[in-house]
């Protein structure tokens, strides 16, 4: 049965199904809807938004439903505008408590029609199960209100850029709302009014504190370069990869920073030549394997239209991003029922909000994080009382 959730928060249980509104309990027989909601965790549901690559309802709406959608959408926008102007928080209130039931019936009715159209006219993605699991994790992250302490910057209030940053934070929500479909390659991006975790300068990270006892960050060492090695069929060195390059590729020449700059100046520039790097890292074989001439299809079945110049870049970045999110799925499952939880993913790392009662799990978390579908990746671990004072620890 096609249905629609009336809110995406776990504590706001409400659905529209078979022409009826239901609250506080989930009716039997629900099977298909538009998008994930937190209270649907653990229920086998088909999500139309995942079928159409993350399109919004208006983008996926067929022409014959466009007038009806525009009418319902305009009313929704009017409600949302009134909530913002009157400072009514949708994080603290259930959406269905703030709007007329007649509107809910009408709006969910058109959502049902669009959902049915998409499910009947789009092919199910090969990586659907992965997208569904990640949607669940991102929904859980969005539910966790952040512990933000702007007093950590009080001694720098005289700096213009600090004051601008504080204003930006105050205008955003105290939640991390990440977009699974915001980039071509699948790398996460932040939605509008989300706390800017992905773009926040390191110098401001001290404002973010754990809700438990400390943050634990698990970070892949030279993640994209390791992905190139893996896609080339080569074994992963377990030491720092840039140090390994100095000894095994650059014949002992140069510093770590110089080695790192040299690698990335060459890696994503198809016209760049570097004889020593090309003896170990075979860019061309990876392009031949995953690029068809018009698109790349990655190791994880993500298809991305592109030209030859971007083929390697998209292949490696997309594969690495999906690899990290697969590790997030594993760790989220590992922490099920624990006080500790996955706080948020960064570009090549995962941050855990850790309770000291779960500290004996750290070594196992590191082991699980490193053990990827592409081999055992090198990784670093950092621990801190806030996100700006993270100190590396030996694994």
Image: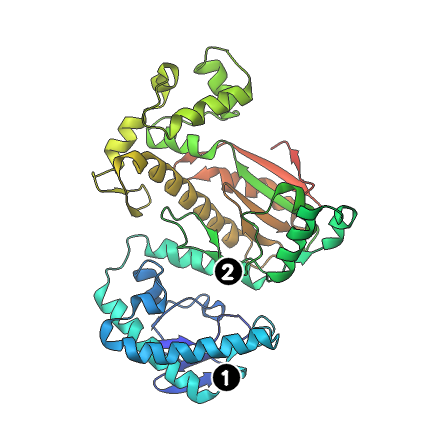
- Residue occupying the point 75% across, 49% down: 157
Earlier sequence position, callout 2 versus callout 1 = 1
Give the left or right position of residue 71, taking residue 381 as reference.
left
Please name the residue that numbered disc 2 is placed on. 192
Where's residue 290, x and y in %? 26, 37
Q: Quadrant of residue 84?
A: bottom right
Whether 267 is drawn above or below 29: the answer is: above
- Disc 2 residue crowd, few under 14, some 14–19, many 20+, Cα 10 Å: few
- Front-lying residue, 34 or 333: 34
Please indicate, yes or no, whether residue 186 appears anywhere in the rendered image: yes
Whether 108 is drawn above or below 223: the answer is: below
Where's residue 195, x and y in %? 58, 56
- Disc 1 residue crowd, few under 14, some 14–19, many 20+, Cα 10 Å: few
Foreground tag (2 vs 1): 2
- Front-lying residue, 109 or 210: 109
Quarter placement of the C terminus: top right
Please indicate, yes or no, whether residue 386 appears anywhere in the rendered image: no
- Residue occupying the point 60% across, 76% down: 88
Where's residue 10, x and y in %? 53, 70
Please name the residue that numbered disc 1 is placed on. 99
Give the left or right position of residue 155, taking residue 162 as reference.
right
Give the left or right position of residue 315, taking residue 225 as reference.
left
Quarter placement of the N terminus: bottom left
Give the left or right position of residue 190, taking residue 117 as reference.
right
The secondary element bearing badge 2 is classed as: loop
Where's residue 27, x and y in %? 41, 81
């Amino acid at each position: 049965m096609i249905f629609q959730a009336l809110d995406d928060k776990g504590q706001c249980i409400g659905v529209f199904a078979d022409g009826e509104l239901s609250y506080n309990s989930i009716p039997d027989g629900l099977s298909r809807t538009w998008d994930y909601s937190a209270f649907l965790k653990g229920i086998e549901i088909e999500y139309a938004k995942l079928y159409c690559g993350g399109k919004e309802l208006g983008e996926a709406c067929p022409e014959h439903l466009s007038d009806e959608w525009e009418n319902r959408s305009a009313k929704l926008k009017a409600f949302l505008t009134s909530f913002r102007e009157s400072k009514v928080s949708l994080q603290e209130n259930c959406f269905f408590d703030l709007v007329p039931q007649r509107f809910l019936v009408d709006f969910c009715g058109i959502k049902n029609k669009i959902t049915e159209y998409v499910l009947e006219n789009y092919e199910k993605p090969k990586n659907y199960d992965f997208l569904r699991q990640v949607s669940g994790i991102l929904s859980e992250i969005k539910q966790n209100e952040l512990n933000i302490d702007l007093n950590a910057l009080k001694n720098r209030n005289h700096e213009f850029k600090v004051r601008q940053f504080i204003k930006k934070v105050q205008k955003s929500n105290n939640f991390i709302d990440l977009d699974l479909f915001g980039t071509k390659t699948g790398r996460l991006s932040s939605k509008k009014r989300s706390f800017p975790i992905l773009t926040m300068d390191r110098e401001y990270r001290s404002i973010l504190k754990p809700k438990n006892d400390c943050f634990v960050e698990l970070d892949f060492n030279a993640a994209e370069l390791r992905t190139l090695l893996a896609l080339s069929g080569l074994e992963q060195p377990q030491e720092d990869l840039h140090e390994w390059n100095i000894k095994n590729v650059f014949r002992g020449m140069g510093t770590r920073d110089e080695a790192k700059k040299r690698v990335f100046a060459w890696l994503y520039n198809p016209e760049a030549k570097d004889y020593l790097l090309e003896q170990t890292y075979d860019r061309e074989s990876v392009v031949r394997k995953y690029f068809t001439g018009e698109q790349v299809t990655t190791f994880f079945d993500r298809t991305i239209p592109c030209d030859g110049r971007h083929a390697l870049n998209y292949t490696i970045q997309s594969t690495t991003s999906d690899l990290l999110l697969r590790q997030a799925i594993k760790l989220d499952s590992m922490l099920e029922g624990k006080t500790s939880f996955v706080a948020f993913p960064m570009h090549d790392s995962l941050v855990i909000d850790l309770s000291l009662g779960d500290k004996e799990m750290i070594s196992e978390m590191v082991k699980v994080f490193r053990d990827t579908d592409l081999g055992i990746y090198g990784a670093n671990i950092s621990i801190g009382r806030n996100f700006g004072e993270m100190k590396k620890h030996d694994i």
